[in-house]
Amino acid sequence: MIGKDSKYDVVIVGAGVSGLFMFHKLRNMGLSVLVIEKSDELGGTWNWNRYPGARCDIPSLEYSYQFDEDLQQEWNWSEKYSAGPEILEYLNHVADRFDLKKDINFEEEVVEAKFNEANSQWSIKTSKQEYQTKFCIFATGCLSVPNKPEIEGLESFEGELLHTATWPRDEVDFTGKNVAIIGTGSSSIQTIPEIAKDVNNLYVFQRTPNYSIPSNNGPMDTETEAKVKERYAEFRKENYLNGFGIASDSGEALISESDLEEVNSQLEENWKKSGLGFFGGYGDIPVDVDANEVAANFVRNKIKETVNDPETAKKLCPEYHIGGKRLCVDTGYFETFNRDNVHLIDLHATPIEKVHSNAIEADETYEIDTLILATGFDAMTGALTSLDILGRNEINLRDQWKEGAKSYLGLGVRNFPNLFTITGPGSPSVLSNMMPSIEQHVNWIADCIGWMLENDKSVIESTKIAEDEWMKLVNEIADMTIFTSTKSWYNGSNIEDKAKAFLPFIGVPVYTEKLEEITADDYQGFIFDKSN
């Protein structure tokens, strides 16, 4: 039923980093706004991913809001790379400081969003009731729908079954237990060193090895923090000038034009200091296969130097381009494989045959108490295709994207008027520093809605031509890099029945320039107040 308090100017789905800021912006514009959140707490990915070792891979001073200078100056991070609990604490502080929680409907899940062409309104059905809204904004995140693998016998496992993306809030005690973890992506790379300290045996089932760079994390350097805060506005602008949106990542030299000895010396310094910046430390690593191989081989040699057993080290060395899969940042990951109680099982050599009530059968049978699935996400589109979003003529977004997701700028989708996505497919999103990319989208959406109100526009929708040309550009740029040559969740390869298409836009400065051009031209590529 639609009650008297169920009509809004804007409904925002999701109360994570993007949903909170979007709500703050629109409420300050005088609009009536509701946020719907399926969890009983805010925080998005940081609320769900509470696994041991969960930590941001972007430096703390760059992974925070910049919309309020007092907020920037008053908040102090305890570490160079913030842990999940501290980020949750920060997001709750922001929500309390700006009085955001009172208009968030917690423990309510959206099941359908339907556009009514007769009145240009969206009907939002949830697990509790129905709402009417002029604008619908999905702030559901790029990595929010867990990928649950189909493994024979998984449902018969009687021990403790966990997924890193839906980790319980109560602390899990691994003391003296035999634990298996499937997957060696970012979540697993952060989890493994933490739980290895307590378990009796840890069996790591590796599907594909991953490149990982040491974070060299530690307490926040107060002198560095003070210097950044003295020039925070300028520092933040640097996010949008770097290809991947990281202010501290500013490599312009090329491996192809440098002396190899000097390159290895610089890579050594980047290994010790740069984290994810290792990948962008030289400008040609993402685009030149020979330069990429120099960097990749450097990391492989580091793995072989770190891991004592040559056979284990060999299994941990990736053979694809570095960066082709999401680069990881770790604290003692490779060192963990020197522990006697940690065992690596190569699933390419010996796949999992079956899960039993208390064991996993692969090259041999491993009796276990706990099974952890660190198998990633239905990335970038899963949160949108997992529910019914019905646009013009009741076209379901899931069906429209069946052959591959298409969006204009990662913000709008044809046939779905007055619907916005924050960091959707076709935007830098996961190939950028997410925080400034989120803020960029939130500001753009708020400005666009404001422009529509000022110019008496009721409906906005991207055109098919603009969408097709934009996604063509996304892929043309991607084809000039190493990213498209590797199977990864960037192109849907981790989900068997998902369309295989490269979805992120590569290059934050180019994207920023395009956004500014389109906005200056009264939102070129969008149409207003008429059907596509």
Image (cartoon, rainbow, N blue to C red):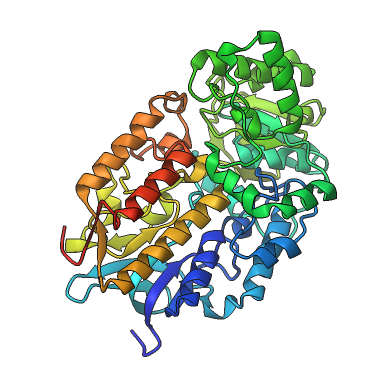
x 67%, y 15%: residue: 263
Where residue 361 sits in the image (x, y, percent)?
Answer: 59, 31
Drawn side of residue 530 relative to residue 332, left or right: left
Where residue 530 sits in the image (x, y, percent)?
Answer: 16, 64
Pick the residue in front: 472 or 142.
472
Answer above or below: position of 376 versus 122. Answer: above
The quadrant in which the N terminus is found is bottom left
Residue 305 in sight in this render:
yes
The quadrant in which the C terminus is found is bottom left
Drawn side of residue 403 relative to residue 243, left or right: left
Drawn side of residue 311 relative to residue 508, left or right: right
Answer above or below: position of 244 versus 281. Answer: below
Where residue 400 sits in the image (x, y, percent)?
Answer: 25, 50
x 51%, y 43%: residue: 430
Q: How many marks?
A: 0
Pick the residue in front: 237 or 11.
237
x 67%, y 32%: residue: 204
Answer above or below: position of 342 versus 382. Answer: above
Pick the residue in front: 81 or 436.
436
Where residue 203 sits in the image (x, y, percent)?
Answer: 69, 33
Quarter of the image for residue 113 reads: bottom left
Residue 1 in sight in this render:
no
